[in-house]
Amino acid sequence: MSELNCPFCTVDAKKILFENDLALAFFDAFPVSLGHTLIVPKRHVASFFELSKKEREAIDSLIFQVQDYLNFTFKPDGFNLGVNIGEAAGQSVMHVHVHVIPRFRGDMANPKGGVRGVIPDKQKY
């Protein structure tokens, strides 16, 4: 996927919640919960492991800004943070994106295991 047809390289400015020099945040187009937000670097790069230290710091800064906003706006009971790296891990848009997913008591029967649920048989331990 090139920058020209990458949905994260062409985000409508009106949809951007927060932005800094190297990254931006916007609501996920296919949210798994109320307030599900994506944070992406402005540079088109596929893997989190290819980010520069400054890009990681910019993303980290937005994670906390988004968390403050979501706490104030939606009052979640918890959060999941996630990054899918590569097709085998479920990455479908080959532009780094960090998921900030607000969680609410009762949104699933038993959330124990959290992100381990990416492999359902391994969530329960």
Image (spheres, rainbow, N blue to C red):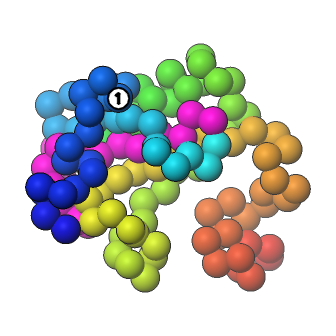
Can residue 79 be seen? no
The amino acid marked with disc number 1 is: Lys
Q: Residue 30 placed where, x, y %?
A: 52, 49
Which residue: 79% across, 60% down? 112
- What residue appears at the point 19 percent right and 68 percent down from the top-left corner? 1
Q: Name the residue carrying label 1.
A: 15
- The residue sitting at 18% across, 57% down in the picture is 5
Reply yes or no: does residue 55 show up in magenta. Answer: yes
Residue range (magenta): 34-56
Left/right placement of residue 103 relative to residue 87 reads right
Residue at x 59%, y 17% (from the top left corner): 72
Residue 69 screen position, x and y as percent: 50, 21
Q: Can you see residue 46?
A: yes
In the picture, measured across the screen, residue 100 lies left or right of residue 12, that is: right
Of 49 and 73, nearer the camera is: 73
Numbered disc total: 1
